[in-house]
Amino acid sequence: MLLYDDSQQDLVVDDFMHLGTLDDDLSEADAILWIGISFEQSASAELFREVSRSLRECGRQDVLQVLVNPDVDSYWNVVTAVSDIDELNFAVVHEKSDSVLEEWLLDLRRPSRSDQ
């Protein structure tokens, strides 16, 4: 989790470029959610490039990355910041995160057809 302009952000992470666990985390990730990120700041676009590079290096470019943001400009911002987005498993949901996350959590709690 990365926070911008939060008074306690260093309690979460010091600096994304120094995340020693990024490659380890990405090697086990089922999905990556970019929630509410506009990609207007170069730091967020750089983090997206770093995550995508790490996924490619560990052979996991098939991991789904989802941008959840109701602002349609956020998609344009990330597409113009990253040259190889077509090579990634990338999806966009143009809705507010609270409704999307609530729906996803409800889906996770529902028994699958194979469990019934």
Image (cartoon, helix red, strand yellow):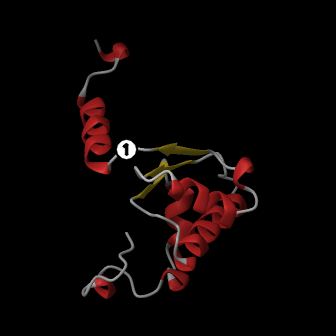
The amino acid on which the numbered mark 1 sits, given as a three-letter code, is Glu
Q: Please provide percent x and percent y for residue 4.
A: 37, 79
Horizontal side, residue 93 vs residue 7: left or right: right
Q: Nearer the viewer, residue 94 or 101?
A: 94
Residue 105 lies left or right of residue 44; in this view the side is: left
* Front one among 55 and 33: 33
Q: Quadrant of the C terminus?
A: top left
Residue at 54% x, 79% y: name it: 43
Residue drawn at (75%, 57%) of the image: 84
Residue 82 falls in image quadrant: bottom right
To which residue does mark 1 refer?
A: 95
* Residue in view at x 32 percent, y 48 percent: 96
Residue 112 horizontal/vertical position (percent) = 33, 20
Could you tell me which secondary element the residue under label 1 belongs to? loop
The correct choice, above or below, for 18 with respect to 75 in the image is below
Instruction: Name the one closer to the observer, 77 or 57.
Output: 77
Question: Which residue is drawn at the image coordinates 65% and 57% (left, top)?
Answer: 79
Q: Residues within 10 Å of mark 1 (few under 14, many from 20)?
A: some
Instruction: Indicate the quadrant containing the N terminus: top left, top right, bottom left or bottom right.
Output: bottom left
How many numbered callouts?
A: 1
Residue nearer the viewer, 88 or 116: 88
Q: Position of residue 58 (x, y in %)?
A: 68, 60
- Left or right of residue 1: residue 41: right
Vertical order, 9 against 66 (above or below): below
54 left or right, relative to 64: right
